[in-house]
Image (tube, rainbow, N blue to C red):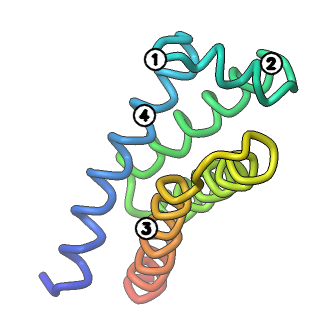
Amino acid sequence: MTLRDGTVRIGRIVLGLFFVADGVIKLTGISKTVQLFERIGWGQWFRYFTGVLVLIGGAMMLLRLRWTFTGAVLCACTVGTGALLYALKLHRDPTLPTVITALTVALAVLAYSATSRDA
């Protein structure tokens, strides 16, 4: 196993579990997510929508290496949109969602190269 393979494996587990937990939190409405999405102003349907997206993306990362790229791109787009909303709509510091987006994009790039190399 190379360093790249180990990085992809650890990234899949850590980010996959993070996004599955984040999706469950959004879908159940705990940890002040209801109030956060009310402040965004797009209604609770948006909370459910993003919860489903990150839950599916996180599960894809955890289940198969072949699906990691797609799951990571799905989650990166969702969290990247969250970073923009934090900065532009909520006027809050977008550092954390921006870092998570960057890590997820890095995982997507590594997973893509790993799957294209194995194919």
Within 10 Å of the Cα at label 4, are there few (<14), some (14-19), or many (20+) other Cα atoms?
many
Q: Earlier in the sequence, mark 4 or mark 3?
A: 4
Circles 1 and 2: CB atoms closer than 8 Å = no
Within 10 Å of the Cα at label 3, are there few (<14), some (14-19), or many (20+) other Cα atoms?
some
Q: Residue at x 30, y 62 (%)?
A: 11
- Up the image or down, 115 lies above or below 22; here it is below
- For marks 1 and 2, give the CA distance: 17 Å
Q: Earlier in the sequence, mark 1 or mark 3?
A: 1
Quadrant showing the N terminus: bottom left
Q: Residue at x 53, y 53 (%)?
A: 97
Foreground of the two, 77 or 37:
37
Q: Which residue is mark 3?
A: 103
Q: Is residue 63 left or right of residue 112?
A: left
Q: Residue at x 55, y 62 (%)?
A: 98
**Picture coordinates of residue 32 (x, y %)?**
53, 16
Of badges 4 and 2, nearer the viewer stands 2
What is the secondary structure assignment of the residue under circle 4?
A: helix
Q: Earlier in the sequence, mark 2 or mark 3?
A: 2
Give me the disc on residue 52: none
Q: Is residue 72 left or right of residue 110?
A: right
Give me the disc on residue 45: 2
- For marks 2 and 3, give the CA distance: 27 Å
Q: Which residue is mark 1?
A: 31
- Up the image or down, 47 lies above or below 79; here it is above
Q: Is residue 100 left or right of residue 84?
A: left
Q: Residue at x 53, y 10 (%)?
A: 28
Of the residues shown, which amino acid type is indicated by label 3? Leu
Within 10 Å of the Cα at label 1, are there few (<14), some (14-19), or many (20+) other Cα atoms?
few
